[in-house]
Amino acid sequence: MQKTAEEYQKDLLWQTALETFYRVAYAESLMTSVLQIWRTIDGFIKSVVTITTIGSVMIGWMLWGTPTGKLAWLIIAGCAAFLALLHIILKISDRVTDLSHNAQYFKSLRLNLERFIYDMLKFGQF
């Protein structure tokens, strides 16, 4: 039995809606995963820079009195400075903001598609 043009269009609409929903849900999941990674990196770098900045006077003064302390503090302060520069160069805060906006957009799109598919089922036209 052959499908009518109307049945073919309904099947095509269902297929397109479900494929689009899958792709949007996948993109949302991917954005969320990447965002978690960048937030972790952002938090780590900000924590290290903050701790070394706050403790630099006290710890630096204590460590500066010993020969190995000078080298240790030089390494710690150098790493913190490098991480601070890396944070600025890679624009990590901007990336986190952009990814947050993108994740929200895909979430909104997914919810709209869910509502659309639900309405298609609810009204029984498809």
Image (tube, rainbow, N blue to C red):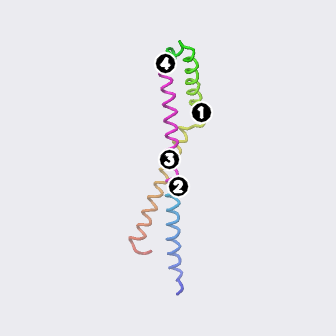
The circle drawn on residue 101 is: 3
Q: Is the magenta stretch mostly helix, strand or loop?
A: helix
Mark 4 sits on what residue? 59
Q: Nearer the viewer, residue 106 or 82?
A: 82
Task: Give the alpha-carbon distance from disc 1 to disc 4, as whole Å.
Answer: 24 Å
Magenta residues span 27-56
Identify the mark nearer the N-term, 4 or 2: 2
Residue type, label 1: Leu
Residue 108 place in picture, x, y as percent = 46, 55
Indicate which disc, 1 or 4, sits on the residue closer to the N terminus. Answer: 4
> Quick check: marks 1 and 4 in contact, CB under 8 Å?
no
- Amino acid type of disc 2? Ala
Question: What's the mark number on residue 27?
Answer: 2
Given the current orientation, which residue lies at the most extreme right position?
Answer: 89
The image quarter containing residue 89 is top right
The secondary element bearing badge 3 is classed as: helix
Crowd rating for badge 3 (residues with CA inside 10 Å; few <14, some 14–19, many 20+): few
The residue furthest left is 122
Disc 2 packing (10 Å; few <14; some 14–19; many ≥20): some
* C-alpha distance separating marks 1 and 3: 23 Å
Badge 4 element = helix
